Image (cartoon, grey):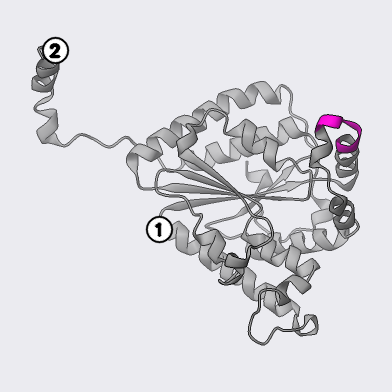
């Protein structure tokens, strides 16, 4: 999975948006079972947790990817959080607070469907949202400049290093979609009645800012892909293939940790036969 990992400065326009893998859906079935098994062992061990961060333009396939990749999971072992516009309560805290309180417990997975990086993406394209955060000294859009966003990016890397040091494995995925493919998917939402509910007029408004969003993503990839939490850019024009690639990335990372079931204390091992007899003869 090395080829998807950001290890040097990139130009987002040069990154692939399409990769088609033969029998991707069938291959995914085997891999997601392996990931599920690893999560069971991780839960029993109780030392690590996993935070999967998913970013991508509208229609990049985040929701369906979560559904298909984690289909074999015990529902209690994974929590999915979709971050929309901050609530009144969330705006009374700093911009990272709502993400911090949703971090996974040891032994569990959390998926951030849109992440803390929205704070250097949406707010950068639309700086009026920064004013809404009521930050001292930032009471007007004219006072917002790029230094704020680059400072936030540094804070986000520090945040990820901190939780990594405390046992949270951070996996960051950017689902890279082409503008042409997004157009097809938006049209599909309009053409198919069962998909109409997914469409919002705001999707078209945001699409007009495509180049602005791409420029922001390029900065995110180049300034926040770290040793502890690198970004993986996954071509997402073909959904089955992108799901498989993400699953393969997750599996490859988790295998590095050598999760093990905890051992029974010796005093319990010595009494196993007695425990068996007690149950058999009750």
Which of these two is toward me, 134 or 236? 134
Report the span colored magenta: 189-194
Which of these two is toward me, 221 or 88? 88
Residue 259 appears in view? no
Which of these two is toward me, 197 or 108? 197
- Residue 42 rendering spot, x and y as whole percentages: 40, 39
- Residue 139 rendering spot, x and y as whole percentages: 72, 84
Residue 131, numbered circle: none
In terms of secondary structure, what is the magenta stretch mainly?
helix
Left or right of 5 in this view: 269: left
Query: Which residue is under mark 2?
Result: 280
The image quadrant of residue 282 is: top left
Residue at screen point 40% across, 58% down: 166
Residue at screen point 63% across, 85% down: 136
Tell me the SS state at disc 1: loop
Left or right of 81 in this view: 167: left
The image quadrant of residue 129 is: bottom right
Q: Is residue 161 above or below residue 245?
A: below
Q: Is residue 192 magenta?
A: yes
Picture mark count: 2
Residue at screen point 74% across, 23% down: 22
Query: Which residue is under mark 1?
Result: 166
């Amino acid at each position: 999975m090395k080829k998807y990992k950001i290890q040097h400065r990139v130009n987002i326009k040069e990154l692939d948006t399409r990769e088609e893998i033969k029998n991707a859906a069938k291959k995914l079935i085997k891999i997601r079972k392996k990931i599920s098994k690893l999560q069971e062992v991780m839960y029993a061990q109780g030392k690590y947790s996993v935070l999967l961060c998913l970013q991508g333009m509208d229609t990049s396939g985040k929701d369906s990817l979560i559904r298909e990749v984690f289909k074999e999971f015990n529902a209690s072992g994974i929590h999915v959080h979709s971050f929309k516009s901050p609530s009144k309560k969330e705006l009374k805290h700093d911009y990272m607070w709502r993400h911090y309180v949703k971090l996974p417990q040891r032994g569990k997975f959390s998926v951030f469907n849109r992440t803390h990086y929205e704070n250097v993406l949406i707010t950068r394209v639309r700086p009026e949202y920064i004013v809404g955060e009521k930050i001292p000294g930032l009471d007007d859009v004219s006072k917002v400049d790029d230094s704020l966003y680059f400072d936030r990016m540094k804070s986000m890397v520090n945040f990820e290093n901190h939780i990594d040091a405390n046992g949270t494995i951070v996996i960051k995925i950017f689902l890279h979609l082409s503008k042409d493919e997004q157009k097809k998917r938006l049209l599909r939402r309009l053409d198919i009645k069962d998909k109409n509910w997914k469409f919002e007029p705001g999707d078209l408004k945001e699409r007009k800012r495509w180049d602005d969003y791409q420029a922001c993503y390029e900065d995110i990839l180049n300034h926040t892909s770290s040793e502890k939490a690198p970004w993986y850019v996954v071509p997402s024009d073909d959904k089955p293939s992108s799901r498989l690639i993400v699953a393969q990335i997750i599996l490859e990372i988790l295998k590095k940790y050598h999760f093990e079931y905890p051992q029974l204390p010796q005093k319990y091992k010595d009494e196993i036969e007695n425990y068996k007899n007690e149950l058999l003869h009750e």
